[in-house]
Image: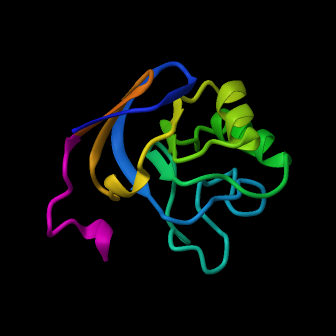
Amino acid sequence: MELKGRIILKGMAQEEALATSQPISFYGGVDPNTGEIIEKGHELQGRSVKGKILVFPNGKGSTVGSYTLYRMKKNGMAPAGIINKECETVVAVGAIISEIPCVDKIDVSKIKTGDLVRIENDIVTLIQRRSASNSLDK
């Protein structure tokens, strides 16, 4: 399956998806030293974004989130790519300064945690669906 979106930062990344239907705040919601989602009550709380294609509807929170994403990149804890429904300024700036491929205008509900996904500029390709026995669902 291919989904066409809008390029926020041109590039290519192919990795396992980490998907949520909830917005993400990088400042205070993600630990920049570990890449772990630390926001209390978030459906991805305790999960690491490191090296994943991070799929979420939109960002939220402070403009410091852009710098937090940059810090994650410098620490080797950043996602490999970002897919949004609507990429707002904080995530866009963070992706650009961190050189993380990013695309929006994508129906993020079509991508599930564990799916193998490729971002190539404005095209998101679902390479392989997660297996029913995937431990990521637990």
The residue sitting at the bottom extreme is: 41
Work out which quarter of the rendered image holds the N terminus and state it.
Answer: top left
The residue sitting at the left extreme is: 132
Q: Residue at x 52, y 19 (%)?
A: 10
The relative height of residue 21 versus residue 32 in the rendered view (above or below) is below
Q: Residue at x 84, y 54 (%)?
A: 62
Given residues 108 and 16, the one toward you in this image is 108
Work out which quarter of the rendered image holds the C terminus and state it.
Answer: bottom left
* Left or right: where 63 falls relative to 5: right
Residue 17, position as x, y percentages in the image? 37, 49
Q: Quadrant of residue 19?
A: bottom left
Count of numbered badges drawn on the protein? 0
The relative height of residue 13 versus residue 43 in the rendered view (above or below) is above
The relative height of residue 70 versus residue 138 in the rendered view (above or below) is above
Residue 118, position as x, y percentages in the image? 33, 33
Residue 64 sits inside the magenta stretch: no
* Left or right: where 7 falls relative to 107: right
Residue 60, position as x, y percentages in the image? 73, 57
Residue 43, position as x, y percentages in the image? 51, 73
Q: Residue at x 31, y 40 (%)?
A: 117
Q: Residue at x 68, y 35 (%)?
A: 92
Q: How is the image coloured?
A: rainbow
Magenta stretch? 127-138
* Left or right: where 131 falls relative to 94: left
The relative height of residue 53 versus residue 57 in the rendered view (above or below) is above
Given residues 39 and 126, the one toward you in this image is 126
Q: Quadrant of residue 99?
A: top right
